[in-house]
Image (cartoon, rainbow, N blue to C red):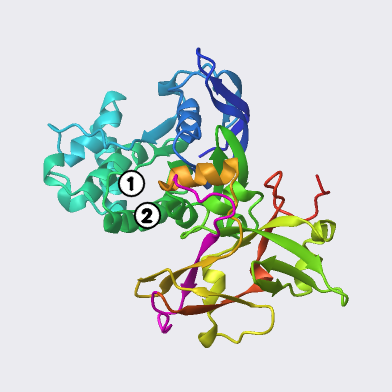
Amino acid sequence: MAEVVLTGLGKAYGDGTRAVTDLNLEIRDGEFLVLVGPSGCGKTTALRMIAGLEQITEGTIHIGENVVNDVPSRDRDVAMVFQSYALYPHLNVYDNIAFGLTLRKLAKKEIDHRVREVADVLELTEHLDRKPRNLSGGQRQRVAMGRAIVRAPQAFLMDEPLSNLDAKLRVQMRAQIARIQREIGVTTVYVTHDQTEAMTLGDRVAVMRRGVLQQVGPPQELYDRPVNLFVAGFIGSPGMNLVSAKLDEDSGGRFWVSLGSDALLLPESVPQQRPALRQYVGRDVVVGIRPEDMEDTALADAREGEILHSVADLVEAMGSDVLVHFPVDVPPVVTDDTRELAKDAGTDDLPKAGKGTVLVGRFSPRTRIYEGQPVAAWVDTSRLHFFDPATGSSIWKQELQ
């Protein structure tokens, strides 16, 4: 096992396209770090540079105590698991797992011990004599992982290994990957486009956008304290509701945010936690509301300044909860961040400013709200997020730009 440290890592191609810019990351010994972001954000390029499959333009890569910038991929003592399983169809499971050890000319007894030990961890023992064509997608992915694990490398590098599996199998394999990584304790860098996968797997998650690291931290930290609009909108499913609003202070020193015909009252804890909010009184701000921080008022202990009124546009019953879509008469947030988030989500048709904004609330399945009916949505105002409309930065303690 070993640390993987990236310092000022960059990649530019001959045509001037820059894939990664000044990437600084320290992946701790035994840590599971997930690189996540939209397609084309540079996460796979960063992984390939660590693996030695992509030449770096600037910066340094440490694996353990060694700088490996000029070390060939085969000598970096890392193992990569690809999106495609890349199994040898003519070899059985045993020989696929053993392939790298056989090339290294280890003793047969040692190879057999390692292969059977790994097969036991991956629950593949009863499949060792089978060919890849006779395995399910999840079993093939475990064989690909076994081929990496058996080498006992200093680090695992995984490039969207679950993207070829169906949704149910991805959930099962996520749990297995997390269990296996904990058991073997090898430093792991895992690339995915799926933020749910990132949040459930990573000890820490690093969000990238256009080749630049936006934020890195434990999953809950990214969810609770996103540093900017992009991270706020990318982390969470459904995504955070983002609306333009005005921040005001009344004669009693209470803070309100106006959203169309409704106004939300901030508890005293919010400006205490976010002292920079005081600099935005009388100004426009971007307010973020997570769907799970809303509820049908009929099922909540709602007070003054905690309710948004509307009419249900769409109601999606999910079983464990109900997603209620309802419009509010406030301008949508249209920035480079939200455009990119919409493009990544496949919803490029962002509404134009002045056309109102549709919010999504995650309500209890006990709600009796139906499409076309009035909605009174309780908002947990202690959980609101605030962003500078010009810079997109989260408003906490920074000075007004």
Q: Is residue 162 above or below residue 46?
A: below
Residue identified by numbered label 1: 162
**Toward which corner of the image does residue 101 lie, by quadrant?**
top left
Q: Is residue 151 magenta?
A: no
* Residue at figure coordinates x 44%, y 32% from the top left: 78
- Residue linked to disc 2: 174
Residue 58 in the image, given as x and y percentages of width and height = 61, 19
Q: Earlier in the sequence, mark 2 or mark 1?
A: 1
Q: Is residue 139 visible?
A: yes
Amino acid type shown at disc 1:
Leu
Which residue lies most toward the front here? 354
Q: Position of residue 359 (x, y in %)?
A: 52, 64
Is residue 109 shown left or right of residue 240? left
Q: Residue at x 75, y 70 (%)?
A: 256
Task: Give me the residue at 62% from left, 45% from top.
Answer: 215
Q: Could you say which disc has been placed on residue 120 in the image?
A: none
The number of callouts visible is 2
Does the rendering let one see residue 186? no
Q: Residues within 10 Å of mark 2 (few under 14, many from 20)?
A: some
Secondary structure under tag 2 reads helix
Q: Quadrant of residue 141?
A: top left
Task: State if disc 1 and disc 2 touch (CB < 8 Å).
Answer: yes
Decide which of 333, 101 is in the foreground and name it. 333
Q: Secondary structure at mark 1?
A: loop
Residue range (magenta): 348-371
